[in-house]
Amino acid sequence: MDHIITVSSFFFFTALVAFLTWLMTRKEDMRSAEGFFLAGRSLTFPFIAGSLLLTNLSTEQMVGLNGDAFSVGLSVMAWEIIPVLALVTMALYFLPKFLKSGITTIPELLEIRFDSTSRLLVNIYFLVAYTTILLPIVLYTGAQGLMGILDLKALTGIQSETALLWLTVWGVGLLGSCYALFGGLRSVAVSDTLTGVGFLVGCFLITFFGLSLIGGEDGILSSFAKLRATVPEHLNSIGGAESKVPFGTIFTGVIVMNMFYWCTNQQIIQRTLAANSLAEGQKGVLLCGALKLLGPLFLVLPGIMAYYLFVATAPEGTPQPRSVEAYGMLVRTVLPTYLTGFFAAVMVGAILSSFNSILNSTCTLFSLGIYRKCLRPDANDVKLVRVSRNFGWLIAIIAMCIAPQLAQIDSIFTFLKTMNGLYTIPVFAVVLMGLLVRRIPAGAARFALIFGPSVIAFMYFIAPGTRFDLVKIMGGFHFLGIVFATLIVSMFVWSLISPRREGTWVQKDAQAVDLTPWRYAVPAGVALVLVVVTIYAVFADFSVLK
């Protein structure tokens, strides 16, 4: 009976979101390039905020970040709190620049600012990274979470974990592909927002029931005292040298990677480029920043609660879960049966949100940056959308084949952030300097886009175990920060020695949308920054740095 309730509630909520998404987008133009890739530049702030949040808050967050919190504690909240600073920067500086140029993709901006070679390089980086890193990780962590929450072994009778993993990955992947490839960006944004409501409710329920279990008869408030008394080392916002996010790295690699992710990462910013005005875009980005402040409550605290329940207070000799299994085990322990199906459905929604957003962005990058630009410049919009869908299916299949191979990786979230450094650091450095220093020539951008990934790849894959292993000597995120600073300085010096031949670059207004800023954008941004500093101060214990 329990399984029937779980499966019924799962399919009901999943079907409801699909039906409402179809109902709200059935009249949209999906045959034109702008309609398919940018939702006709019609998105308002609730859909922008909802889609931004859900694209980010997927299973690599729920499973991966809670898994890291299970291992080391509160210090990993940097991946949820520091993004607020990046979102403020996006709203106040980058978004006005992007909307002024009327771009569809970040590589398109690089062609406007530098040249077609810079655009091609970044297109290739994004395509390779999305196909081989991001899409497989979303599918793998999603499958792991569902297998734990729904106890799919018992539900399906399949005892082989490998077989079950493959089946779950392909089921989720095929469903997500249908959303992205038949509905376009608007269906992605609408389904994200609808699922987001259920997602936030479900995540907070996990936190509520977990705290209730720990508090027991003494009530929820006592649970915090019990956590602090039993696992105080897990409640420190400051990461020591052994933490997955040492405190010093916040000011080097961590902040730079977040700036890239929220300001120049195509999969994220594509919905901001679809804003119907600058004011709506700024409100959506800053609202997402405010919602991110709640992230530690359901993306970090559950991992700490899992450590308390399954390690710190567990009977001696009890098998401990791996970090990647901790969140699913907590959900299965604390969530009532009648809510399990609902939570699994919103989790699938979160998986689909990230998966279909990345897939949609991948199709956009290929269609506009490779196919139309290099292969078929004369392709009309109908042909472009058809090619985009066919390419999307190919990429989805590749990702679904790679995803199960990630089963041997323990800290999937740290792996994701580390591998992303290969391309995120150089791309952000080039975009930032291209907008700030308008006499940097195209040659400097090409140098940074080739040298940056090359030196990072060398240190990741060749230098380990040698005296040149700077990643081990400095720490991974510090190393990325050094590379970023090196690229910034080299491009600036290049602009002094051999400035742009055409003179100072002047950005032209494409007249794509109304560029009147939101009147409260700056006060809202300042308020968000102050809240970030306060959160860190409240939970800080700097003694771990000694």
Image (tube, rainbow, N blue to C red):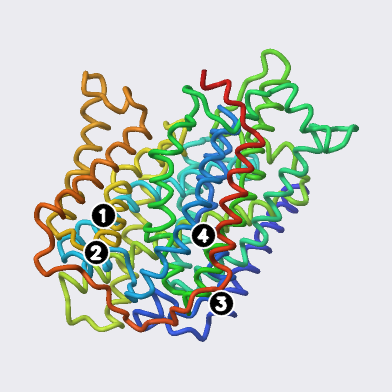
Q: Nearer the observer, disc 3 or disc 2?
A: 2
Label 1–label 2 contact, CB within 8 A: yes
- In terms of image quadrants, where is residue 264? bottom left
Which amino acid type is shown beneath numbered disc 2?
Leu
Label 1–label 3 contact, CB within 8 A: no
Which is more N-terminal, label 4 or label 2?
2
Residue drawn at the location 71% of the way across and 58% of the way down: 9
What is the x, y in percent for residue 543? Answer: 58, 21
What is the x, y in percent for residue 124? Answer: 23, 56
Instruction: Determine the CA span between mark 1 and mark 3.
Output: 39 Å
Residue drawn at the location 32% of the way across and 74% of the way down: 101
**Residue 22 tag number:** 3
Whether residue 134 sits left or right of residue 227 in the image: it is left
Instruction: Determine the CA span between mark 4 and mark 3.
Output: 15 Å
What is the x, y in percent for residue 204? Answer: 71, 49
Q: Nearer the observer, disc 2 or disc 4?
A: 2
Residue drawn at the location 24% of the way across and 67% of the way down: 369
Q: Nearer the viewer, residue 358 or 2?
A: 358
Q: Give the vertical position of 140 relative to 54 (above or below).
A: above
What is the x, y in percent for residue 81? Answer: 55, 46
Q: Give the vertical position of 528 relative to 155 (above or below).
A: below
| Residue corresponding to mark 1 | 430
Which amino acid type is shown beneath numbered disc 1?
Val
Which is more N-terminal, label 3 or label 4?
3
Helix, strand or loop at label 4? It is: helix
Label 3–label 2 contact, CB within 8 A: no
Q: Give the vertical position of 37 relative to 248 (above or below).
A: below
Instruction: Determine the CA span between mark 3 and mark 2.
Output: 35 Å
